[in-house]
Image (cartoon, rainbow, N blue to C red):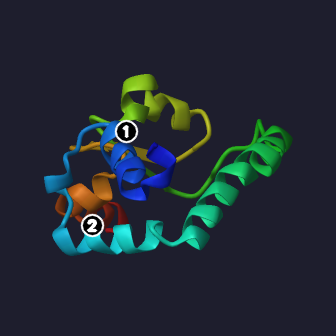
Amino acid sequence: MILSDPDRYYHSCLLGWGGATLDDFDREQLMAYRTAWRDPETTRAMCNDYRAAIRHDFDDDAEDLGARITCPALILYGAQGAMARAYDVAATWEMKCTQMTAQAIPGGHFFPDTNPGDTVTALQNFLR
């Protein structure tokens, strides 16, 4: 059963959200992830984060639906990730930001992990 095997479950998350293989992750980084997700308290906290999205985030978002972010905003997303496949990420955020830079980074949902070089370059360029 997938729930009794945290490695199998979380590997499916790392790979299933698009654009990555296990070989794309730094070996030490992947071991640190495995150590964390094998701890039941980590899994509990992760589930609580998703529960909060349902219980709190939707209400908070509804309260400020028309508000706009007025500071410069950098929107990065994985070019081959689930969000890029399902949405026009830049157009979605453009409605919420007055000063926005959007950039697709090669990779999937975990592009900062699998493509740190391009992620750092995008951040540095934005902060200049």
Q: Can you say whether 7 is above or below 106 in the image? A: below
Horizontal side of 116 relative to 23 (left or right) equals right
Residue ID for mark 2: 30
Find residue 114 and report its horizontal and vertical position in percent.
Answer: 22, 56
Q: Amino acid at mark 2?
A: Leu
The residue at the point 65 percent across, 50 percent down is: 50
Picture quadrant where residue 65 is located: top right
Horizontal side of 5 relative to 79 (left or right) equals right
Picture quadrant where residue 58 is located: top right
Q: Can you say whether 127 is above or below 1 in the image? A: below
77 or 9, nearer to the observer: 9
Picture quadrant where residue 125 is located: bottom left
Is the Cβ of the residue at disc 1 closer than 8 Å to that at disc 2? no
The answer to whether one can see residue 81 in this image is yes
Tell me which numbered mark, 1 or 2, is placed earlier along the sequence: 1
116 or 52, nearer to the observer: 52
Marker disc for residue 37: none
Find residue 11 and report its horizontal and vertical position in percent.
Answer: 33, 50
The residue at the point 34 percent across, 52 percent down is: 110
The residue at the point 43 percent across, 34 percent down is: 83
Q: Can you say whether 35 is above or below 17 in the image? A: below
The answer to whether one can see residue 76 in this image is no
Mark 2 lies on a secondary structure that is: helix
Residue ID for mark 1: 17
Find residue 109 and report its horizontal and vertical position in percent.
Answer: 36, 45
35 or 52, nearer to the observer: 35
User: Where is the C terminus found, in terms of image quarters?
Assistant: bottom left
Point out the frontmost of discs 1 and 2.
Answer: 2
57 or 90, nearer to the observer: 57
Mark 1–mark 2 distance (CA, rounded to whole Å)? 16 Å
